[in-house]
Image (spheres, rainbow, N blue to C red):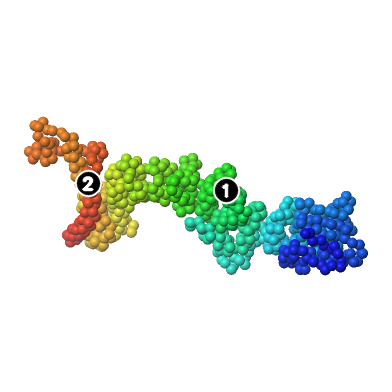
């Protein structure tokens, strides 16, 4: 039943439920505007003696008012009452509703109007709709002198403008509030008091603290709450938030301050699971099952707008790379527009060189699908492939290393096929990989989880690894790894020998340069012997000694030789002895492989006797000399023989590691004794 205001002067004034609720709409309203309007209608009726004859309907409420005050102040009612004498119904497009009309009714009766940030926008729009003279100018004055000077008041007015669109936009209420908030936000960043209280800390520091860390929506939410101005902005509807961000950039705020605000907004409304659950539960109260769909629709609209607000150029310090990958993972569950999806993937690709393996999206393992066939892996495969093969950008080596680390995380899936793994490895070319250590780890982990692979499948996977790009530690692990094919083990063995020889050469050159700089007479900073003390000359240890120099004869003093670094000499002797032992062992291994091929071929000598592996003592040297082993001898061996040969190589390394140290100490002591004898002479 409708409540009629001012219908009977003798009855006690009774407030309707809507009027009682209006008291709590604004903390500035005391007493209620509805109560004041009722009293003013009764007072006017007593003073003039004319009853209220005009019924005005606004939504679900009706107001019984006098004709003269309405017609004299509102042109809308003056034209409407010419056609209809006693009943006027405002259209549904009337801004502000019954609360705004109560204020206009008081103004028409000549009372003072109480404006506040909660009702000024509605009253301004309603006054413009009803063409109330003088009230619109008073509202504009209040907005300019009061609202726009306060951060909280401007926020309140801007939030109240949302149901008043497009009228509030046409009256420039929204644009004035947006520009004012943007200006005050810039002043907040440039506040000297804040900089003095917290030296070296700014509002972008929270976002920089997320660089290099796994994305955590709850942690980001806590960081956003530290700055009140950011917390207020991210609570706005997206249309208003977008306009404020654009105003911040237009007024000159640096991108390192603007981008974190966009990050915090997206985390609250797109990436937060709590927000999604709230939307789904609030829209599913009717029981029609559309809550999840509506929540995804709202998240999709905000995500598309956030993608447009993100900076086009990569800035790894302002916005962490994990944020872009979190948006990519969320977009895979939403129906993003094609243009927004392409823009998001381009932004993800531009941040690949700043990312770490934990930033890349990992799918959840499903019972009926392999991880490699999930949307997350397929999306990353497309992005990395376009980055490395089509775009030819800088930082391809870092992206290749990132992709290999990502493969280490997904190869543990038992449903991953070898062919699919080979496709994922081929996304990055071998030339872009500076090191193959992580690729070796991925393949080794795959072989651990998939023990039923055949020899050909293992060889096909290991063919992607270049032993020359393995580190010394990875080579040692590969040589001792029984899961690897023998051909790969032999390649790693030779690469390990090359690493050892290179280390030996570098240490030798460094040691020789150090000695030559101090022992050559006439060189600046060199050692100068005392008068009458000849400098003894040492003989080279061998014709292939790394210390031999054909252009300069290095004079060695026995006393200074004993004072040299013991560690460098020990490393030199150990490396030299190990290389010689390795060469002898490899020659022995080749001879064994040759004898094995000879037996397998079933060759018979001309005299009909079985071929013997013992050399005839009376035979000439040319007969005893073996032919060189062909390059295909390893492939012709049986699997058991290959394993025995590999095990023998491993035992040789073990003996060399123990015997080389003791032998080097013995040779070192002999060298010292010889040097002492030379000095005595």
**Mark 2 vs mark 1, CA separation in Å:** 60 Å
Relative placement, left or right, of 198 versus 496 is right
Measured from the top left, where is residue 172 in percent x and y? 74, 54
User: Do the numbered discs 2 and 1 sit on residues whose CB atoms are within 8 Å?
Assistant: no
Residue at (62%, 58%) from the top-left corner?
A: 234
- Residue found 77% across the figure and 59% down from its top: 1
Residue pictured at 16% horizontal, 34% vertical: 602
Q: Residues within 10 Å of mark 1 (few under 14, many from 20)?
A: few
Horizontal relation, residue 137 to residue 386: left or right: right
- Which of the marked residues, 2 or 1, is nearer the chain's N terminus? 1
Q: How many marks?
A: 2
The answer to whether residue 387 is above or below residue 197 is above
Which of discs 2 and 1 lies nearer the camera? The answer is 2
Task: Name the foreground residue: 221 vs 1.
Answer: 1
- Residue 594 against residue 68 in the figure, above or below: above
Instruction: Determine which residue is flagged by label 1.
Output: 312
The disc placed on residue 439 is: none
669 to the left or right of 253: left
Name the element at disc 2: helix
Q: Which residue is mark 2?
A: 644
Q: Residue furthest front?
A: 1
């Amino acid at each position: 039943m409708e409540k009629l205001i001012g219908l009977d002067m003798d009855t006690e004034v009774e407030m309707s439920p809507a009027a009682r609720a209006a008291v709590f709409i604004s903390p500035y309203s005391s007493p209620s505007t509805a109560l004041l309007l009722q009293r003013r209608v009764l007072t006017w009726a007593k003073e003039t003696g004319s009853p209220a004859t005009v019924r005005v309907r606004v939504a679900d409420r009706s107001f019984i008012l006098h004709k003269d005050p309405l017609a004299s102040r509102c042109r809308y009612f003056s034209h409407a009452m010419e056609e209809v004498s006693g009943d006027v119904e405002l259209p549904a497009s009337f801004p502000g509703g019954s609360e705004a009309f109560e204020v206009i009714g008081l103004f028409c009766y000549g009372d003072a109007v109480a404006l506040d940030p909660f009702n000024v926008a509605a009253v301004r729009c309603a006054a413009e709709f009803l063409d109330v003279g003088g009230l619109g100018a008073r509202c504009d004055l209040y907005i300019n002198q009061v609202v726009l000077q306060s951060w909280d008041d401007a926020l309140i007015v801007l939030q109240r403008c949302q149901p008043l669109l497009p009228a509030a936009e046409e009256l420039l209420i929204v644009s004035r509030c947006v520009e004012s908030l943007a200006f005050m936000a810039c002043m907040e960043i440039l506040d000297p008091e804040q900089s003095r209280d917290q030296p070296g800390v700014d509002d972008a520091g929270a976002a920089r603290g997320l660089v290099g860390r796994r994305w955590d929506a709850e942690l980001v939410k806590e960081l956003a709450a530290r700055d009140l101005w950011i917390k207020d902005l991210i609570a706005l509807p997206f249309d208003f938030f977008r306009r404020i961000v654009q105003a911040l950039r237009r007024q000159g705020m640096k991108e390192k301050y603007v981008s974190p605000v966009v990050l915090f907004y997206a985390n609250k409304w797109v990436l937060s699971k709590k927000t999604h659950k709230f939307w789904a539960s609030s829209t599913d109260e009717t029981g029609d099952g559309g809550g999840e769909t509506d929540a995804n629709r709202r998240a999709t609209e905000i995500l598309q707008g956030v993608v447009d607000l993100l900076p086009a150029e990569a800035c790894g310090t302002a916005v962490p790379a994990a944020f872009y990958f979190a948006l990519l993972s969320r977009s895979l569950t939403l129906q993003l527009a094609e243009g927004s999806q392409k823009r998001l993937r381009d932004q993800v690709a531009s941040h690949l060189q700043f990312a770490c393996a934990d930033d890349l999206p990992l799918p959840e393992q499903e019972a009926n699908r392999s991880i490699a066939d999930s949307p997350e892996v397929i999306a990353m495969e497309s992005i990395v492939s376009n980055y490395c093969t089509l775009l030819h950008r800088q930082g391809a080596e870092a992206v290749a290393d990132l992709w290999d680390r990502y493969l280490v995380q997904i190869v543990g899936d038992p449903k991953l096929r070898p062919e699919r793994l080979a496709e994922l490895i081929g996304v990055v070319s071998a030339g872009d990989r500076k090191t193959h250590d992580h690729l070796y780890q991925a393949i080794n982990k795959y072989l651990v989880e998939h023990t039923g692979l055949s020899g050909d499948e293992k060889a096909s996977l290991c063919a992607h690894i270049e032993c020359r790009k393995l580190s010394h530690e990875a080579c040692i692990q590969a040589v001792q790894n029984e899961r690897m094919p023998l051909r790969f083990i032999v390649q790693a063995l030779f690469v390990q020998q090359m690493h050892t020889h290179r280390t030996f050469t570098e240490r030798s050159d460094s040691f020789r340069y150090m000695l030559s700089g101090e022992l050559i007479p006439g060189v600046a900073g060199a050692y100068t012997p005392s008068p009458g003390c000849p400098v003894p000359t040492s003989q080279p240890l061998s014709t292939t000694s790394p210390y031999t120099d054909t252009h300069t004869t290095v004079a060695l003093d026995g006393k200074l030789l004993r004072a040299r670094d013991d560690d460098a000499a020990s490393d030199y002797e150990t490396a030299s002895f190990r290389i010689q032992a390795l060469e002898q062992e490899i020659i022995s291994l080749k001879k064994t492989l040759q004898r094995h091929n000879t037996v397998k071929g079933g060759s018979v000598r001309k005299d009909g006797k079985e071929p013997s592996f013992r050399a005839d003592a009376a035979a000439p040297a040319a007969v005893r000399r073996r032919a060189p082993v062909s390059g295909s001898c390893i492939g012709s061996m049986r699997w058991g023989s290959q394993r025995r040969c590999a095990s023998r190589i491993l035992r040789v390394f073990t003996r060399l590691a123990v015997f080389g140290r003791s032998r080097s100490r013995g040779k070192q002591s002999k060298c010292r004794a010889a040097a002492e004898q030379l000095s005595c002479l």
